[in-house]
Image (tube, grey):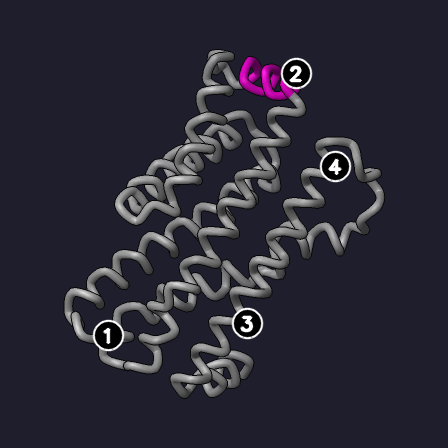
Amino acid sequence: MAAFVAMRAVATDAGSRRFVGLFWIVTVALSAADFLGSAGRSLKVLPPGLLSTLASALLTYRLFVPLGVAAAAVALAAPARRRPVLGALVFSPRLRGALRLSIALSYAGFELGKAMHPAEMRQFFADSGLPPWLNPAIIAGETVLAAALFWPAAEIAAAVGLGLILVGAIATHARNGDPFSDSLDALHLLVLLAGLAILTVGARRHRMENPEG
């Protein structure tokens, strides 16, 4: 029922633009709030108990808005080429821009947390049987690749590179016997990156097929 109402709301071109604008605002606001909360905890500026468990979960996963819209957009990407209104939604640059910002802010929070807890990271890599130099190498690689998401010529390659690192992280947690919750952030980002890559490829194909549109 909710999906039907959402689709009715974007059943016009103007409605699609309003929906994308709202999505951009909500996604960026929640992603920024999540980053500030994560940074505050890493820098010990915010007390650990300041946010309730529920509020922390809502911020961390941004109410699943980016994830849900990314999944819906991917599902619509193929037929959208034949549906102008849906195409205006699925191939909107602002939709992809919101996903890029959400991903980039997530990585900014993660890298800051790693940098502020070097001893814990070294111990994790040692316990996982990985060389200690791999931790700063991954931090540097993730930082460069996250920034490259905003460079059109390198966006797909950057998304693939980040995805491979995330798959490696998930595999490492699984091999260590870590709880599944330790892999949730990586899974969340992996789905967003896949959605962003598919949408970007679809938008490029759409522009090639509709050079005047």
What's the amino acid at mark 2?
Answer: Ala
What's the amino acid at mark 4?
Answer: Arg
Give the CA separation, mark 4 to mark 1.
44 Å
What's the amino acid at mark 1?
Answer: Arg
Which residue lies at the image location 55% right of the left edge and 13% below the top edge? 126
Whichever of callouts 2 and 4 sits on the residue coming sooner in the sequence is 4
Which residue lies at the image location 40% right of the left edge and 87% below the top edge? 12
Whichever of callouts 4 and 1 sits on the residue coming sooner in the sequence is 4
Which residue lies at the image location 44% right of the left edge and 20% below the top edge? 137
Where 129 falls versus 207 (above or below)?
above
Where does label 4 land, which residue? Answer: 41
Where does label 1 land, which residue? Answer: 81
Which residue lies at the image location 43% right of the left edge and 84% below the top edge? 14
Whichever of callouts 1 and 2 sits on the residue coming sooner in the sequence is 1
- Span colored in magenta: 118-127
Q: Main secondary structure of the magenta part?
A: helix
